[in-house]
Image (tube, rainbow, N blue to C red):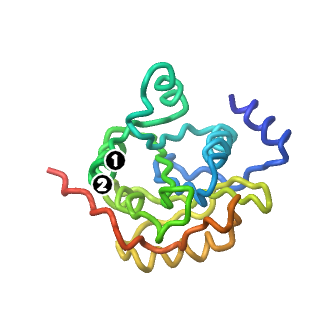
Amino acid sequence: MRGFARWLFRLTGWKTEGAVHQPPRFVLIAAPHTSNWDAVILIVAAYSFGVRISWYVKHTAFFWPLGPIVRYFGGVPIDRRTRQNAVQQGVEMFAQREHFILAVPPEGTRGRGDGWKTGFYHIACGAQVPIVLGFIDYARKVAGLGPTLVPTGNIESDFRVLADFYNTITPRFPQHRGEVRPSPTREPPPSPAS
């Protein structure tokens, strides 16, 4: 599959940049997210890098025959009716796995939002794993893995680092890009482990 993904990128004029953080256990920011094509490019890029990523999908998508296909490509069912569930579930998945990459689009929607959802940040803090700045730059036709951020717990300061990086990346639809700052409606941090 890796060879096919690389061939597909070459065929369409896309390329990859960066290297996989080692060990492969991190939260991967999937940004910017302004188009349905972002998910396709993300999955092809992951195969090009030779890694398996997991990503949240609404639990309602796991019906026959779509469910097995979504799972094959890394989909993890999530019931978004409670915010805490997504963060806590992410922390628990990291606790159960030696190698795990959870890709999260913090914009949460393809439309312009009021800042980034902070669940990815709380998952990384709760699981004590780094955050890798994944990106899809349509201006350069590059999908890549940027710097690694070890969250400090100071969310405002860490988001300034994220903004400095992502403000140089061009989304498919720039008019839909949200500001890289914590959303006013933030997810709560995970419950302490018992």
Q: Residues within 10 Å of mark 2 (few under 14, many from 20)?
A: few
Residue placed under numbered mark 1 in the picture: 80
Q: Residue at x 66, y 46 (%)?
A: 37
- Three-letter code, disc 2: Arg
Are the residues at dot 2 and dot 1 in contact (C-beta closer than 8 Å)? yes
Give x and y (percent) for residue 163.
56, 75
Residue 83: mark in rendering: 2
Residue 92: mark in rendering: none
Q: Residue at x 51, y 55 (%)?
A: 105
Give x and y (percent) for residue 106.
48, 59
Give x and y (percent) for residue 1.
68, 28
- In the image, residue 95 above or below residue 63: below
- In the image, residue 55 above or below residue 116: above
Query: What is the secondary structure assignment of the residue under circle 2?
Result: helix
Residue nearest the observer in this picture, 169 or 148: 169
Give x and y (percent) for residue 67.
46, 26
Q: Residue at x 41, y 67 (%)?
A: 151
- In the image, residue 47 above or below residue 189: above
